[in-house]
């Protein structure tokens, strides 16, 4: 089963569905992982109903961080900001579907950190659970 998830990660890394930027956007935030140099920006556009109508990510990094960003931005389409803010580490790990070392965990959670910082309008987010 791990091979299936590894293939999914490689596919989302090599063929991202949500890569790009949105201009105009309602939410945009950028941050990096100083441990490995991964850098990520997430843009979100909200519809009139307050739900996410479009999302995109840009940046560079390892397969885990880029696949995580692609999967996460894809998963938030149609969600309210309240639902977006409620996404936690468990959802990211479930999307990726493989065991991660502590260093790779930071890579996987960069997209969540960036998304939550943007959704809350904060400079820094520490609570990813």
Image (cartoon, rainbow, N blue to C red):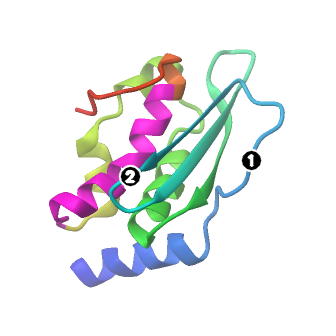
Q: How many neighbours does mark 2 have within 10 angstroms: few (below 14), some (14-19), or many (20 or more)? A: few
Where residue 110 sits: x, y (%)?
40, 47
Residue 111 sits inside the magenta stretch: yes
Taking depth in this image into account, of 48 and 57 the one nearest to the observer is 57
58 on left or right of 48: left
Q: Secondary structure at mark 2?
A: loop
Residue at 39% across, 66% down? 64
Q: Quadrant of the C terminus?
A: top left
Q: Earlier in the sequence, mark 2 or mark 1?
A: 1
The answer to whether any part of residue 1 appears in the image is: no
Taking depth in this image into account, of 13 and 39 the one nearest to the observer is 39
The answer to whether any part of residue 60 appears in the image is: yes
Where residue 127 sits: x, y (%)?
26, 27
| Front position among marks 2 and 1 | 2
Where residue 1 sits: x, y (%)?
22, 79
Residue 105 sits inside the magenta stretch: yes
| Separation of residues labelled 2 and 1 (CA atoms) | 22 Å
Q: How many neighbours does mark 1 have within 10 angstroms: few (below 14), some (14-19), or many (20 or more)? A: some
Mark sitting on residue 39? none
- In the rendered picture of this protein, how many numbered marks are placed on residues? 2
Is 115 rendered above or below residue 26? below
Residue under numbered circle 2: 34
12 on left or right of 26: left
Residue at 75% across, 30% down? 25
Give the quarter of the image for residue 28: top right
Q: Are marks 2 and 1 in contact (CB under 8 Å)?
A: no
Q: Secondary structure at mark 1?
A: loop
The residue segment tinted magenta is: 99-117
Residue at 52% across, 54% down? 39
Where residue 45 sits: x, y (%)?
71, 30
Residue under numbered circle 1: 21
Query: Main SS type for the magenta part?
Result: helix
């Amino acid at each position: 089963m791990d091979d299936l998830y590894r293939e999914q990660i490689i596919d989302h890394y090599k063929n991202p569905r949500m890569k790009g930027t949105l201009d105009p956007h309602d939410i945009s935030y950028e941050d990096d992982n100083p441990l490995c140099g991964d850098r990520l920006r997430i843009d979100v556009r909200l519809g009139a109903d307050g739900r996410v109508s479009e999302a995109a990510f840009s940046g560079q990094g390892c397969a885990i961080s880029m696949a995580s960003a692609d999967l996460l931005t894809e998963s938030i389409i149609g969600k309210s900001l309240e639902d977006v803010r409620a996404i936690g580490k468990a959802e990211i790990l479930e999307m990726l579907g493989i065991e991660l070392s502590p260093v790779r965990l930071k890579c996987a959670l960069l997209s969540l950190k960036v998304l939550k910082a943007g959704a809350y309008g904060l400079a820094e987010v520490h609570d990813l659970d």
